[in-house]
Image: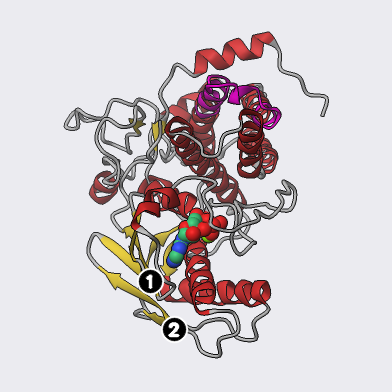
């Protein structure tokens, strides 16, 4: 708790914040394969040791530029300090001292990279993002430097296989381990960022007597949380890749599952949501959910993200069903989950008969802090380790955050309602997975 930012650190942060972030795609993240070598991991850590400070610096800057005194709220300042401290820890991490020969070998690309990997590793425009909306660059893949792709200007690469002919010195492995444990400390430090920012917004609303948050703050929160998803993805991925040297599962590359089974995950989310619903309303049996899904359907995704989105939308549906039909009903209308498999997208539709949402309230469901729960549960920054997961409802973060997760990998989340009847939520998941992270 004794950490203090220096003026010098803040200057460095300002400098870094002038560089654009480099978007990475799901494809590039899986190219590391089952067992990345010490050299390949080291190269990834070199990319991250530049990329993460840039992304952290943007957030520090943005927090201090928040309008209307929001930047002065104690919780906002607290989060800003976390970002600054993490920036400092990454940028001051001692680099290994390497011989000239090893340094040269680290610069050489691996010989492999067949035709397919070249095609797959190029990052494309994220389809859920209008062109020009984000100023981040697209990261180049292995081998796309042969001039045929003029759009791609980034020079830094995330994945690049190292020349693994020969031993790597122990210093390299030591560095990889130190780098991963630094990331681990950072990831934990930022666990309660969402709750703490939410707290900061509450402080602001109270101080300024505001009922709603305006468009600017909404846009800021979208950017901020999207950036957080990206940073945590890269950090989580790198920690898992580092651990993978000792224990690996053939279906996983880091935290990405190359064979994410949609039905199993949906089934689990249904059970969890029903359990939370029973617990919350004191029901013996929560409303039923019917799942229509090909049992063999699998695709490459981050299971944790998909579980989060399904759990949040299912809780909303169950709550709407219970509250519209009354807690003491014996039978509730069944909520239906249908999974469709297309070439481009896997789409999951969650249809409930929970009475729907008035058309005038639809835009509000996408705003943070909008909830129709009367009493928002108390915010406990320590209890919640991941984004408002546990409670039934009440923070108004379920839908907007789920939509960010969907968009992060080029998908989307849409909601269509029939007031007086029910709501359909469409969760589109992009299968092509070459699209770049939408960053700003
Ligand atoms: N399936 C649904 N049926 C009816 N209303 C819904 C549904 N999903 C969401 N809503 C409305 O949108 C609001 C915001 O949802 P969400 O972002 O998940 O926050 P929370 O569940 O914490 O209130 C809910 O409070 C509810 O009023
Ligand atoms: Mg909810």
Closer to the N terminus: mark 1 or mark 2? 2
Against 164, is 334 above or below?
below
Q: Nearer the viewer, residue 305 or 357?
A: 357
Q: Nearer the viewer, residue 270 or 28?
A: 270
Q: Could you say which quadrant of the image residue 432 lies in? A: bottom left
Against 383, is 106 above or below?
above
Residue found at the very far right of the displayed protein? 2
Magenta stretch?
55-79
Give the residue pinned by disc 2: 333
Q: Quadrant of the C terminus?
A: top left
Against 351, is 328 above or below?
below
Q: Residues within 10 Å of mark 1 (few under 14, many from 20)?
A: many
- Is 59 covered by the magenta stretch? yes
Q: Quadrant of the N terminus?
A: top right
Magenta highlight: main SS? helix
Q: Check mark 1 vs ligand 1: CB closer than 8 Å? yes or no.
A: yes
Query: Where residue 230 sits: x, y (%)?
Result: 48, 41
């Amino acid at each position: 708790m004794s950490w203090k930012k220096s003026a010098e650190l803040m200057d460095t942060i300002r400098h870094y914040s002038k560089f654009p972030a480099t978007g990475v795609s799901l494809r590039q993240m899986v190219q590391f394969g089952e067992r990345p070598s010490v050299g390949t991991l080291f190269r990834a850590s070199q990319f991250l040791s530049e990329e993460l400070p840039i992304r952290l610096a943007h957030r520090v800057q943005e927090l201090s530029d928040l309008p209307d005194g929001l930047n002065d709220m104690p919780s906002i300042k607290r989060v800003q300090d976390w970002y600054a401290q993490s920036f400092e820890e990454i940028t001051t991490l001692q680099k290994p001292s390497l011989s000239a020969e090893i340094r040269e070998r680290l610069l050489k690309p691996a010989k492999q990279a067949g035709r397919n990997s070249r095609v797959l590793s190029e990052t494309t425009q994220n389809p859920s993002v209008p062109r020009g909306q984000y100023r981040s660059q697209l990261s180049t893949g292995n081998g796309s430097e042969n001039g045929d792709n003029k759009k791609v200007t980034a020079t830094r690469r995330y994945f690049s296989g190292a020349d693994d002919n020969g031993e790597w010195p122990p210093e390299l492995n030591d560095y990889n381990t130190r780098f991963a444990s630094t990331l681990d400390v950072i990831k934990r430090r930022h666990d309660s960022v969402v709750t703490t920012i939410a707290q900061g917004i509450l402080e602001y609303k109270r101080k300024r007597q505001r009922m709603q948050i305006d468009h600017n703050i909404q846009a800021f929160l979208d950017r901020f949380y999207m950036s957080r998803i990206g940073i945590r993805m890269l950090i989580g991925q790198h920690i898992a890749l580092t651990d993978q040297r000792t224990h690996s599962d053939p279906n996983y590359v880091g935290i990405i599952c190359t064979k994410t089974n949609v039905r199993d995950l949906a089934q689990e989310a249904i059970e969890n949501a029903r359990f939370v619903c029973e617990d919350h309303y004191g029901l013996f049996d929560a409303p039923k959910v019917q799942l229509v899904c090909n049992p063999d359907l699998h695709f490459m995704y981050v299971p944790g993200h998909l579980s989060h989105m399904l759990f949040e939308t299912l809780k909303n549906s169950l709550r709407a069903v219970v509250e519209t039909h009354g807690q003491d009903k014996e039978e509730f209308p069944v909520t239906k989950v249908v999974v469709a498999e297309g070439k481009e997208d896997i789409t999951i539709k969650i249809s409930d008969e929970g009475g729907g949402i008035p058309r005038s309230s639809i835009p509000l469901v996408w705003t943070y802090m909008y909830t129709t729960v009367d009493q928002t549960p108390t915010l406990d920054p320590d209890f919640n380790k991941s984004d408002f997961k546990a409670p039934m409802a009440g923070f108004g973060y379920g839908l907007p955050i789920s939509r960010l997760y969907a968009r992060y990998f080029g998908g989307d989340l849409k909601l269509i309602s029939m007031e007086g009847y029910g709501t359909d939520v469409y969760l589109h998941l992009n299968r092509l997975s070459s699209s770049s992270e939408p960053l700003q």
